[in-house]
Image (cartoon, grey):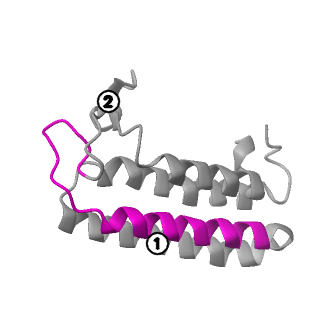
Amino acid sequence: MIDISHPDSEFIFRAGAFTDRIKNYCRKYILESFEERKITFQDMKIEALLLLEFSELHFKENLNSISKSVNDLNVEIDKLEAINISSEDGNCTVCNTKLETFDTLIKEKDFRFITICKKCPNEIYNILNTIDWATGAAFI
């Protein structure tokens, strides 16, 4: 648990927001056409770049690890961006794996259900977890 009165807590929460936005893009691209995904993947790369720039200012002690992870993230995004296969209805538009939808039990309509692919975003999630540990956001 993070001590919110600690002077670095703001930076940790902000770093976590970067990785959370990238995770949210992972729930978006799995439903998009090839052309739509190109834009989403570019947005993910921009978010990663902003995270790296933010880390240069606030996480200098772990910058090498974060920089390597951001590079790995971009490589993985490039791999996914290059995939252009046809998919069946109800499957991920990138890897054609059956999508799963969960009820979050949140009352707000936009957050009630969450659809995920259990295959193609996994490496991105693993990389983002590494970044979260390097920034301290894993403790949020």
Quadrant assignment, res 69:
bottom right
Residue 112 versus residue 21 in the image, above or below? above
* Left or right: residue 114 compared with residue 70: left
Residue 19 versus residue 1 in the image, above or below? below
Residue type of the residue flagged with mark 1: Lys
Residue sitting at x 47%, y 74%:
46
Residue 58 versus residue 104 in the image, above or below? below
* Left or right: residue 59 compared with residue 127: right
Number of marks in picture: 2
Going from N to C along the chain, the mark reached first, 2 or 1, is 1
Residue 21 versus residue 87 in the image, above or below? below
Q: Which mark is residue 45?
A: 1
Label 2: which residue? 100
Residue type of the residue flagged with mark 2: Glu
From the image, give the main secondary structure of the stretch colored magenta.
helix
Whole-percent x and y of residue 87?
Answer: 17, 47
User: Dot 1, how many residues are within 10 Å of its Cα: few (below 14), some (14-19), or many (20+)?
Assistant: many
Element assignment for label 2: strand
Quadrant assignment, res 84:
bottom left
Q: Within the magenta stretch, is there residue 126?
A: no
Q: Which mark is residue 63?
A: none
Whole-percent x and y of residue 32?
Answer: 22, 55
Read off the magenta span. Answer: 64-93
Q: Within the magenta stretch, is there residue 66?
A: yes
Residue sitting at x 68%, y 57%:
131
